[in-house]
Image (spheres, grey):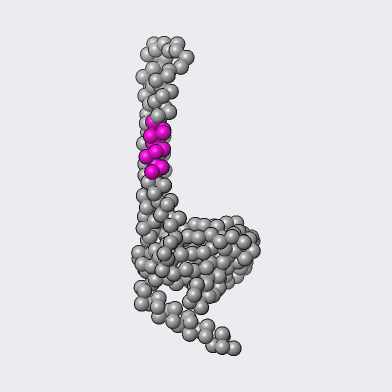
Amino acid sequence: MIRKLCLSAAGLLLAGNAFADWTLNMPKGVTELSVETYGLHMMVFWWCVAIGFGVFGVMIYSMFKHRKSQGVQPASFSHSTTAEVVWTVIPIIILLVMAVPSAETLVKIEDSRKPDMTVVVTGYQWKWHYNYQNEDVSFFSSLARTSADARRKQSGIDPFSVDNYLLEVDRPLVVPKGSKVRVLLTSNDVIHAWWVPELSIKKDAIPGYMNEIWFRAEETGTFRGQCAELCGKDHGYMPVVVEVVEPEEFAAWLAAEQGNTAPVAAN
Ligand SMILES: [Cu+2]
């Protein structure tokens, strides 16, 4: 029996290597708020671990120490005021310890004042539209051709051979590093949700409403997410890609985009 257990444990460990890329936890992200959110999440996690150990520890100890074979007699009292006070006060203290830093972060998340730039993001079935406010730049961002082809039934394309399968778009949202980007979220048809885990953003895009969020990426890079609201049959095919670039690079990109749209406007 023990040999069998050891063998299966070894098997699991070996299989674990195949999932080296696998992470169960949320990402730490690249914004101040995503790091704070990650910290809160870990704090609550460790509180849960401590509470779990505490409660199960007392239960297991009591069951073992006061077992029948030791000749222990059941207690005859019906309730204990002391115990009731203790198990009311301790959870209240734990909740307060968690609530104070959470409230601080929530206040920061809601504070979208004085942004450096604003992008209006509109959800469509099944793509995103980005409009750089006051910059005369706007475009749709759809699932990349490579993923769109591979996802079709009997396409004959192995999805594993496609880079960032279902997480790539034809035109990502480009933003500069270090700028406070305000995102105004709405939708043209049904409820979508704009979700980029590493920017710590997940908010519904609702028709007729304007939701507001913001982020300030501290690192350059490509950050991926997806629509997180079941929005129709192609819900799984509307990824979000945000490219964070150096401010100079962004200025050049913006100028090029404005140049692109100028001839169209002239017509
Ligand atoms: Cu959607």
Magenta segment's dominant SS is helix
Place of residue 36 in the rendered image (x, y in percent of width and height, measured from the top left): 37, 52
Which residue is at the front of the view, 237 or 186? Answer: 186
Place of residue 236 in the rendered image (x, y in percent of width and height, measured from the top left): 57, 61
| Camera sees residue 205 | yes
Whether 150 is drawn above or below 67: the answer is below
Which residue is at the front of the view, 249 or 265? Answer: 265
Q: On the image, which quarter does residue 150 sit in?
A: bottom right
Which residue is at the front of the view, 20 or 114? Answer: 114
Q: Residue at x 39, y 11 (%)?
A: 71
Indicate whether residue 94 is drawn in magenta: yes
Span shown in magenta = 90-100
- In the image, taking residue 79 as reference, residue 209 lies left or right, namely right
| Camera sees residue 165 | no
Q: Residue at x 51, y 64 (%)?
A: 184
Q: Residue at x 37, y 46 (%)?
A: 101
Q: Residue at x 41, y 64 (%)?
A: 114
Whether 155 is drawn above or below 107: the answer is below
Whether 169 is drawn above or below 260: the answer is above
Indicate whether residue 185 is drawn in magenta: no
Place of residue 142 in the rendered image (x, y in percent of width and height, measured from the top left): 55, 71
Whether 263 is drawn above or below 193: the answer is below
Q: On the image, which quarter does residue 124 sit in?
A: bottom right
